[in-house]
Amino acid sequence: MIATPLRVAGGVLTVAGTYLPWATFVLNDGAYPAKATLEFFTEPFGVTGYRAHLLALGVAVVVFALVTVPGQGRILRALGVGVVAVSAVNGLWITVAGGGLGAVTVSDADVAFGAPVALAGGVLVLVAGGRGPQEAVPAWRRRLPPWWERLILLGVFVLLLLVVSAVLTSGGQGGAANVYAGAVFLSFLAAAGAGIGALHASGLASWVAAVSERHRGFSVGVLLACALALPFTGAGTEYWMTVAANIGVYAAAAIGLNIVVGLAGLLDLGYIAFLGIGAFVAANLSGAAAARVGVELPFPLVMLVSAVVAGFFGAIVGSPTLRVRGDYLAIVTLAFGEIFVRSAQNDIGGLTGGSNAIPGIPPLSLFGHGFDERLALGTVEVAAGAAYYVLVVLVVAAAMLVFANLKDSRLGRAWIAIREDEDAARAMGIRTGQVKILAFLVGAMLAGLAGAFYAHKTATASYESFRFIESVTLLAAVILGGMGTIPGAVLGASILFVLPEKLREFSDYRLLLFGIALILIMRFRPQGLVPDVHRRAELVSDPEQPTVALPAVPVKAGR
Amino acid sequence: MSTLLSQIVNGLVLGSLIGLIALGYTMVYGIIQLINFAHGEVFMVGAYGGLAISTYLLPAVLQQQWWLALPLLLAGGAVISGAAAVAMERFAYRPLRNAPRLAPLITALGVSVALQEAVRVFYPGAFSPLPFPRVFLEGAYVVPIGDGVPVRYSGLLIIVVSVVLSVALQRFVDHSRQGRAMRAIAQDRDIARLMGIDPDRVIVTTFALGGVLAGVAGVLYGTDLGFVNIDIGFQTGIFAFTAAVLGGIGNIRGAVVGGMVIGLVKTLGGQYLPGGTAYDYVWIFVVLIAVLVYRPQGFFGEPERVRA
């Protein structure tokens, strides 16, 4: 077989590229992270940052090329893609930000070969892939003693927490002060993606998923604990807590939208309006000076009222489903969304503040302690905003609970039946009208809940935050993640709301890239990143299913 | 009285413009049952294309002569919009021809966002409204009724061009060989293919025709209002879609009539309904919802078939 030597050569090239210089000079703002300059010769073996990632990937390529393991081809393919992505991101960044090709080729007779060599190594690994993609993902069915399995799950989830924290903070806060943020983040994302892809390709990810399914209660508990522990990791600063809390708001809303779109198959293009309604209701009941309704209610009650009001409007918006189907329904929801924005913009009834918005919504507080203040738990200091994060984790967890229970309920099965074939569902005795309106109602309630939280967290409720493009973004989050699954909605929301934070220097191109991404997703991976098993079967004919069907675990597969 | 009349005139002018765009929606939907959400952006691209031609290509001498400048701008806008529409069909929609219904609609949203942002990012100065040269005769003809009802010449131009083009389109679809092929594809794509019609070619022609009409509309819009803005595509696109549905989607005459009705709803609603012009959009959306719910086949549409 020619493949093995080629793969080894690819891995060796990657490692060699790691140790070659990446730029011919020190960049203006100081050395590129991990000293991607000629100066690294002062410290030849001290690779850090993306070069450490490349080193790890290259060594892994060599190891997996020589040792035969199940799923070898797929593992190598994932690693190769990772090498290509990491070296391309960094090579391009150095070239572009370093002022043209001179940054990586010739300057003062020095040549920086790092990027091209590593890139060539990655390409070589991919070219040598051979039968990689056709190979089935190996299905591991080994069972360990329950306590061992739980211990492994605990380790995996803690690792996951650390990865999430690292992804969130990698590159630091983007913006003019930190021009490296975007490149470092993308590079780290590529490396982490390669690692996760390799784990998936080895079948271990599916095995862990199967194990966690066996210990469901335990997994949920540990996951929740891990999520709540994020403030104690490196991400526990005020800035990242704010980002994480914002992601949480959109994740909760995305789960609600997922009920409408993912389960019931009703495309809603005005969904953000319900988040807006929740926010405006909460703003009016918060005792803010600018609010027309000068009532101040305790926050749990406010959440309840917001959810109920949003649900009421959800039922109204959903009522045309009795007569309208498909794309026409999508347009009706869009029209409702636009009516909401126009009305809010015009300060309808004095309730929305119009273009002045409703500012000065007081922060939440518990036991006389404001949620926006720093908190000291004994000797441990917790960053300001962590309390909001904890609360939003609970809100998202509640939304997940609602979603998971509904999905497996009689109602959830009715929704799925309607999505598959409405006429057949009706023939089977499902009251389609009521059931569809219920989907809108429940989805809107979740958004209203998130909106109430959002109003207090951002301290303002403005119609600007609830425009059409926000609805499209939420929809894109659901689609990108995978319609009809919980991890999908959360993952999609995280990606779509972390990327703009990280890629500030590309902020002009944000929406452009977003639009193009939407087109590409529908073209190449319409089932999303974490597809629903049934849904995937409809969207793609895929020979990559594991040979032995696992319990209902979403299987992520490359195409 | 003259307020009412001049609002009616305004409504008809706006309506003709909307009708011109609605033709693109209606033809595409009629043939492949796709709500081409990005069609409004094609209109916007046409307006910016015309602006680019007048700013960067036309010598100032030509600008002075409206009978030279106007046809050049119209042709330029039409070509650019037509090209945008063709590219959109080729790269975004064609690969999804047999995908589930949701997929092309979401793609259309993506195309819409991408087109709008591409113009905003790459057209110099497009982040704020840009002045558009008034290449046609300025001023207005005053109809001597009551205190006098002014009809802008550029508005008159819009009405005339719109009516002429829609009549021409109707004749094209009814009598030309291409038009027959379009109708055949609309009825049954598979059978049409068996009869030797290439569906891809016909569909791309349809997109191109719609794009050309939208481009003309874009240049006319700029000439009449004297400025262009990035979000005209989305707003006007929604109005045009409403008009197409109102007239009965797939029906050319319906699109024009629907456009007129929408134009009148906007101007008269802004004038006489509570809330004034701040709420004129809302009335259009209310009309849209009401039509979709109570008469989805519109004025001239076929009685409803089962829609997936």
Image (tube, coloured by chain):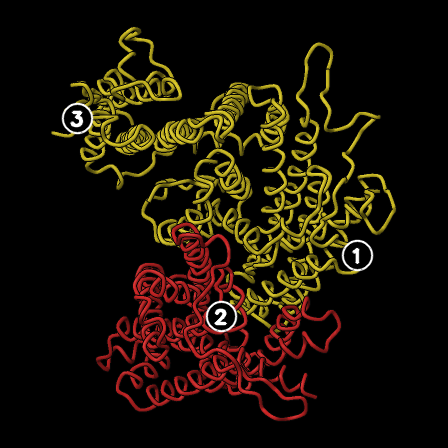
Chain colours: A yellow, B red
Q: Measured from the top left, where is residue B169 in percent x and y?
A: 37, 85
Q: Which residue is mark 2?
A: B308
Q: Residue at x 35, y 50 (%)?
A: A524
Q: Measured from the top left, where is residue B217 in percent x and y?
A: 43, 74
Q: Measured from the top left, where is residue A454 in percent x and y?
A: 68, 41
Q: Residue at x 70, y 49 (%)?
A: A448
Mark 1 belongs to which subunit? A
In primary-sequence order, the first of circles 3 and 1 is 3
- In this view, the residue farthest toward the bottom is B145
Q: In the image, is A53 to the left or to the right of A534?
A: left
Q: Residue at x 60, y 63 (%)?
A: A333
Question: Which quadrant of the figure has residue A77?
Answer: top left
Q: What separation in Å lies between label 1 and label 2 (alpha carbons)?
A: 41 Å
- Identity of the amino acid at label 3? Thr
- In this view, the residue farthest toward the right is A295
Q: Which residue is mark 3?
A: A4
Q: In the image, is A194 to the left or to the right of B243?
A: left
- Identity of the amino acid at label 2? Ala
* Label 3–label 1 contact, CB within 8 A: no
Q: What separation in Å lies between label 3 and label 2 (alpha carbons)?
A: 51 Å
Question: Which element carries disc 1, helix, strand or loop?
Answer: helix
Residues packed near mark 2 inside 10 Å, few (<14), some (14 to 19) or many (20 plus): few
Q: Is residue B54 above or below residue A169?
A: below
Residues packed near mark 3 inside 10 Å, few (<14), some (14 to 19) or many (20 plus): some
Q: Which residue is mark 1?
A: A350
